[in-house]
Image: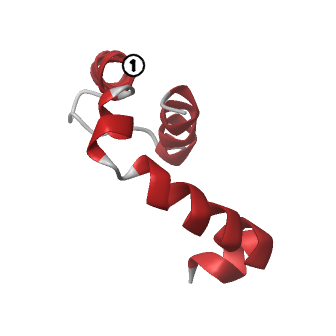
């Protein structure tokens, strides 16, 4: 479970922040930035795929970089 991986402190912080971030007016402020990061991520995926259209084994690292861009 997520709590074991990131710890109880992270879970508590995330729970509090999530309540604010899920409010529509708050979320709207971040839509364009997240969209921009997501479109760049899609371009990155196209660039790193192999001839079988598969992503590399270390693709999770790319996902982590994208998630940092979205914050």
Residue most toward the left? 52
Q: Is residue 52 left or right of residue 67?
A: left
Q: Is residue 57 above or below residue 55?
A: below
Residue under label 1: 33
Residue most toward the front? 25
48 vs 70, nearest the viewer: 70
Res 41 visible: yes
51 vs 67, nearest the viewer: 67
Q: Is residue 44 left or right of residue 28?
A: right
Quadrant in the picture for residue 9: bottom right
Q: Is residue 54 left or right of residue 48?
A: left
Residue at 30%, 27% in the rendered image: 31
Q: Is residue 65 above or below residue 60?
A: above
48 vs 37, nearest the viewer: 37
Horizontal and vertical percent position of residue 13 = 69, 63
Res 49 visible: no
Q: Is residue 71 left or right of residue 24?
A: right
- Number of labelled discs? 1
Applied colour scheme:
secondary structure
* Quadrant (top left/top right/bottom left/bottom right) for the N terminus: bottom right
23 vs 59, nearest the viewer: 23
Residue at 47%, 52% in the rendered image: 20
Q: Is residue 51 above or below residue 1?
A: above
Horizontal and vertical percent position of residue 45 = 33, 26
Residue at 44%, 39% in the rendered image: 56
């Amino acid at each position: 479970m997520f709590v074991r991986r990131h710890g109880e402190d992270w879970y508590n912080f995330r729970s509090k922040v999530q309540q604010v971030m899920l409010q529509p007016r708050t979320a709207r402020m971040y839509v364009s930035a997240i969209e921009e990061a997501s479109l760049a991520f899609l371009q990155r995926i196209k660039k790193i795929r192999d001839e079988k259209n598969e992503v590399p084994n270390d693709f999770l690292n790319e996902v982590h970089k994208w998630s940092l861009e979205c914050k």
